[in-house]
Amino acid sequence: MLKTLFNIALRHLLGRRRQTLTTIFGVAVSTMVLITTNSLTRGLLDSFVETIVNVAPHITLKGESMRPMPVNLFKEGRPMSVAFVQDNIQKLDREEVRNYRQILTVFSSPQYEKQVVAASPYVESQVMAVKGGRNQPLLLKGVLIEREDAISGIGKKLVQGNIALFEKTSNALLVGRTVARDMNLKLNDQVVIIPASGKSRQCKVAGIFFSGVNAVDNSVLVSLKLAQIIEGLPANKVSGIALKVSDPFQNAPLARELERITGYRCLTWQEENASILTLFARIGYIVFSLVAFVGIVSGFGVANILVTTVFEKSRDIAIMKSFGFSAVQLVGMFVFEGFMVGLAGALVGGVLAIGSINIFASLPVESSQGPITKTGFSMSYNPLYFFLVIGVTVLISTLAAILPSARAAKLEPVSVLRDSNL
């Protein structure tokens, strides 16, 4: 009986080849577009996370104290007293980490040496860079180059110059590629650095780097000592400490513990990039909602071909019921037709999606994809997304066959045969 129902369902579909192929093609195109779009959004997120984890610090110890001076100085000694403040004048202290070398010894202690892979103190300063008639505001970051290399791998990201030249020159600059392009900088060029306060300094370009992170490539690196002089900091103070940890994806507990021990705010890379990660999450929700909507449209196409089949084959259905085919068997036959159309279209769409993903990934075009810059599009090849979209498409196509099959099951053989003048 099942073989007979299968043969009849197959004849129904082959009997209307043009309409069947058109419906399969529509399902295939929608499946291809959804898989490709999902691959692009997920690939961009995966590429961003991978780039950030490899380039940016996993935890950043900021110069923001977690133990600020209390507003009411009498509260602890006199719980029932009330303090009134008039003309409160506070000193605007900049964020800085004091005695950073002592904190570095904590990170290298036996308790944390397995969790903290590398630590790099840094000093940040907003400066103006001037070369000839061009000037540009940018972020200047002073680092100990060996420690910074352990965090971001800056040595492997140099497209011009080398770290040895940077270490030998006291006023050397490592310039991000974006800055180099905007200011037309080349190796050994002289650049005047003008800080917000203090005298200007002439520096020399010792290298140009490209990390792929737009914010990093729009900055310059100098030695830690030079940055401390520019920012007016003593030798024992820095703006913060960048940390690379053994588990960058489970770093929140370690960050909270380091806050408690050091007394300074510690931000994970997830917290610093929360807005971007939230944006990617919203894009993901939109893509998955598109899967549902486009799948429903494909389901209408499947339902349309089956409704037409029921209308044209109503006499054949009546004859089948006269021969003893039950309503459940007829429903199963049409549901099976919807399943075959959906499966064929989804599988063809999956094959087309593989081709479109490879085409996008191989395009030799450098593009700025949100916060990162890459050559070609970042595409995800995760098979989970293929199975998910194909499964949803087949399910919707199968469900779309229920309404036409229910109509076929309700046909009365006597009425149909009498009206068809058989």
Image (spheres, rainbow, N blue to C red):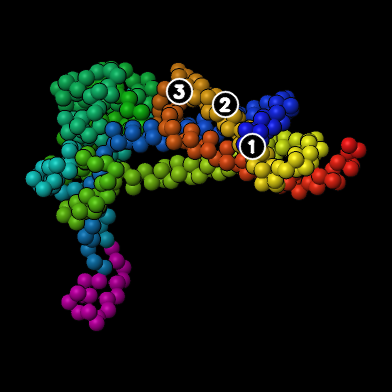
What crowding class fits label 1: few (fewer than 14 Cα within 10 Å), some (14-19), or many (20 or more)? Answer: few
Q: Quadrant of the N terminus?
A: top right
In the figure, is residue 257 to the left or right of 134? left
Judged left or right of residue 318, residue 255 is left
- Name the secondary structure under disc 3: helix
Camera-nearest residue between 169 and 252: 252
Q: Quadrant of residue 291?
A: top right
Give the quarter of the image for residue 88.
bottom left
Q: Which residue is mark 2?
A: 348
Q: Which residue is mark 3?
A: 361
Using the rendered view, name the quadrant where residue 183 is placed. Answer: top left
Q: Name the residue: 25% across, 71% down.
A: 72
| Point 33% across, 45% down: residue | 270
> Magenta part mainly helix, strand or loop?
loop
Residue 392 circle label: none
Question: Which SS class for mark 2?
Answer: helix
Across and down, in percent, residue 80 comes to: 24, 82
Residue 121 lies in magenta, yes or no? Answer: no
Tell me: 335 left or right of 123. right
Vertical position of residue 277 compared to residue 352: above or below: below
Is residue 82 found inside the magenta-colored segment of the image? yes
The one of 248 and 103 positioned closer to us in this rendering: 248
Contact between marks 1 and 2 (CB within 8 A): the answer is: no
- Residue receiving disc 1: 1
Q: Which residues are magenta?
A: 72-89
**Numbered disc in front, either 2 or 3:** 2
